[in-house]
Amino acid sequence: MSVTVTTDLRPDPGEAAPPARRLTQLQALESEAIHIFREVSAEFERPVLLFSGGKDSVVMLHLAVKAFWPAPVPFPVLHVDTGHNFPEVLAFRDATVARLGLRLEVARVQDYLDAGSLRERADGTRNQLQTLPLLDAITGHRFDAVFGGGRRDEEKARAKERIYSLRDEFGQWDPRNQRPELWNLYNGRHGVGEHVRVFPLSNWTELDIWRYIAAEAIELPGLYYAHERQVFGRDGMWVGVGPYSQPRRGEPVETRRVRYRTVGDMSCTGAVDSSAAGVDDVVLEVAASRLTERGATRADDRVSEAAMEDRKKEGYF
């Protein structure tokens, strides 16, 4: 009995070709981010994910969960706590960590102030004091890859940073010494004491983030949606009244319906007037906006034209 083996796998000329599967923009961004998470997990020994409870870190953690499901996320999360965070965001952070069974490492700015390693700034903000606790946490835990939620559309210094961003043994970034990134090929080589900052959301925009939050039904802290809050005007922003942000003389307090586009130190993060009570409303609002969230609501980026780049060179997020 003879058997004929056919090795010609070409389709029959009369047979219709299967339709090509085309990813939507959000699916393509999700696929890229998941690929980055898996690549880093396979390539590095001790990754860590920066998680503050803000929208970008929440989306980043959601993507990490999807990347390794049904296995648990194989790395811890790290938060640099200024001591001036929004209480509702900290509560959300702790609830999320408990729900997912993650290991949370916290580096506290207050510990460095108490020890005399850092000094309070004249303007009262602690956002710019986070660099030393961050670098010490990275060194102390020997993290060699640090996932951050930075996006290129946020700010010009972040726009020119690579997805894999090499930091030297002092945690510093040199924008003139960046590696080429071709297609989905990333160079994770690093020397002793060096580490790599990894930005899975680099190619996302604020609108992409909110459309993904809507599509995936991702829960966020309530201050991202419109609510009534006591605020006062300062530097063209509405600053919420709180223990770390008090009005000065000539800054009247009023109750307004506002929401926060980005969440940082209470003393340097402004709110915007908004009636967007739900995620679909926020998507429409962001689509109509012509200012990035950092440009519109972050006082710490207004110190100079190169404020963010100067901080990143020193080791900031």
Image (cartoon, rainbow, N blue to C red):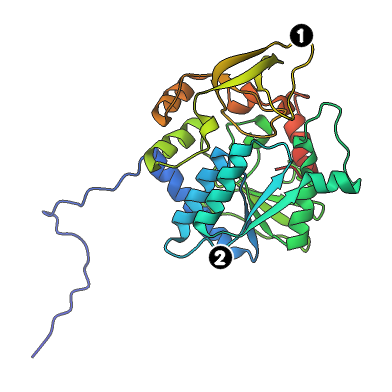
Is the residue marked by circle 1 packed among few (<14), some (14-19), or many (20+) residues within 10 Å? Answer: few
Q: What residue type is labelled 1?
A: Gly
Query: In terms of secondary structure, where does tag 1 sit?
Result: loop
Can the viewer see residue 237? no
The numbered disc on residue 71 is: none
* Pick the front one: 233 or 294: 233
Quarter of the picture containing the C terminus is: top right
Check whether the beta carbons of the residues at disc 2 and disc 1 lie within 8 A of each other. no
| Residue 144, percent from left and from top | 69, 60
Residue farthest toward the bottom in the current orientation of the protein: 1
Vertical position of residue 228 compared to residue 189: above or below: above
Position of residue 41 in the picture relative to residue 23 (left or right):
right
- Taking the view exactly as shown, the residue that stands out farthest to the right is 116
Q: Can residue 242 be seen in this view?
A: yes
Residue under numbered circle 2: 42
The residue shown at (62%, 21%) is: 296
Q: Residue at x 44, y 42 (%)?
A: 218
Residue at image x 58%, y 25%?
292
Check disc 2 and give the amino acid type. Answer: Ala
Q: Mark 1 points at which residue?
A: 250
Q: Nearer the viewer, mark 2 or mark 1?
A: 1
Q: Which of 225 and 60 is in front in this view?
A: 225
Q: Looking at the figure, which quarter contains the N terminus?
A: bottom left
**Earlier sequence position, callout 2 versus callout 1:** 2
**70 sits to left or right of 244:** left
Identify the secondary structure beneath mark 2: helix
Q: Residue 275: x, y in percent?
A: 46, 19
> Mark 2, residues whose alpha carbon is within 10 Å: few (<14), some, or many (≥20)?
few
Q: How many marks?
A: 2
User: 107 or 315: nearer the eye?
Assistant: 107
Which residue extends farthest top? 250
Residue 289: x %, y % from top left = 51, 20
